[in-house]
Image: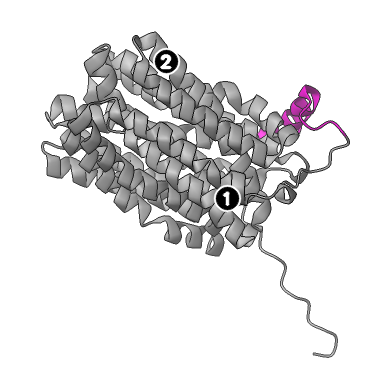
Amino acid sequence: MQRQLILAIYAPTLILAFCSGLLLPVLPIFVRDEFVNSYGIIGLVVAAGAIGMIIGDVPAGALVGRLGLKRSMLIGIAGMALGTLAFTWASSVYELILYAVSVGFASTLWNISRHAYLAEAAPSTQRGRAIAIFGGINRLGSFVGPVVGGALGGTFGLRAPFFLYALLALLALIFPAWFLMESSQRAPKRGGVRGHTGHLWQVLRENYRVLLTAGSGQLFAQMIRSGRGIVVPLFAADVLGLDVTQIGLIVGLSSAVDMVMFYPAGYVMDRFGRKFAYVPSFAIQALGMALIPFTGSFLTLLLATSLIGFGNGLGSGTMMTLGADLAPDDARSEFLGLWRLIGDGGASGGPIVVGWVAGLLGLSLATFVIAGIGLTAALALGTLVPETLRRPPPPTAAIGD
């Protein structure tokens, strides 16, 4: 099982995280330089992938139950590769938005199927570490990806990272295709109603309180996480005058701080409880985001983004672990589809809020707004969500001991 987890899930996750990292410092600058110089439109393009996830989350949750984990992973990764390749021949902002939405839609199949696999493979007392390792692998790719993407874009042009993304994503297909056995797709038995629209409504009715309370915290949490993806490159370029290579270095070094925190995050979640990781995580990110407008150089911006990286690293895998803890055994993929719908709503909302506020009132004020959203996430998760770590009961002493 461990070998299959590494080769079928962790290996392609590393490759695809690197691919996503390639585009982090490039996409906002690509849109600005080659299409339109408008914060609002740039924010919309950056958010379009998350919008595609929102569109796909609920149907993908049902499809994973019907198609199985392996087929869902393969279709999802292939769609991500082809959709990203389409960026290289885009001739308008409208095409960019369409392609980004298609990539987001395809990624939901990959995201939900691997999330469901991790939720089933790890018991509660080991789940935090298993998913935090997964989060750490994502962060490893995000650490290297921006540096390579920035250097590649600066040397060969801003379309070059999109070509590399598509090529590597197709390579990532090999791992689940070869190493994920069909027998590992342990779909829960639901009397033939799996994936049916009526069953989705039943899952929603039975879990709406959890989705409303814990989901609100996740919504705000993902907003600050995605908001930094547009704040940092644009602040670095437009306010500090840094070039794309320097921006890639800042994003990459911040991701390095983020990356090294994955194991402590998993240990804290499984040893002390989930709240001990995610509450300070989003409070620290809020503080780092609030410091960005006070930076005035490459070094000071790097320090602020490194603090954000530290906070985000402490939250490595927390929202996925929380979702896995809350998901009912007999409707896991459907619940996770709804859970991801909420999170992806926040992920798409972050760049849109930044673009809208920055266009009206300036980039610095938009940064403060995102910081406030992060603080709200910490408060909501700390006060509205009960601890979800479930420890096994202690063994009962035998009579006469």
Q: Is residue 300 left or right of residue 99?
A: left
Which residue in the protein does label 1 denote?
8
Q: Quadrant of residue 28?
A: top left
Mark 1 packing: few (<14 Cα in 10 Å), some, or many (20+)?
many
Tell me which segment is drawn in magenta: 192-209
| Relative vertical location of residue 244 with respect to residue 317 in this rendering, above or below | above
Q: Would you say residue 27 sits in the magenta stretch?
A: no
| Relative vertical location of residue 13 with respect to residue 44 in this rendering, above or below | below
Residue 97: numbered disc: 2
Q: Secondary structure at mark 2?
A: helix
Q: Looking at the magenta stretch, what is its main secondary structure?
A: helix
Q: Is residue 89 left or right of residue 32?
A: right
Name which residue type carries label 2.
Ile
Between 394 and 47, the residue placed more toward the observer is 47
Q: Is residue 90 left or right of residue 61?
A: left
Residue drawn at (76%, 29%) of the image: 195
Name which residue type carries label 1.
Ala
Q: Is residue 86 left or right of residue 147?
A: right
Point out the residue furthest to the right here: 191
Mark 2 packing: few (<14 Cα in 10 Å), some, or many (20+)?
many
Position of residue 230 measured from the top left corner of the image (x, y, whole percent): 31, 28
Position of residue 126 measured from the top left corner of the image (x, y, whole percent): 60, 61
Point out the residue furthest to the bottom here: 400
Residue drawn at (40%, 27%) of the image: 350
Display colour scheme: one colour
Q: Nearer the viewer, mark 1 or mark 2?
A: 1
Position of residue 394 measured from the top left corner of the image (x, y, whole percent): 71, 72
Quadrant in which the N terminus appears: bottom right
Taking the image as drawn, is residue 273 in sight? Answer: no
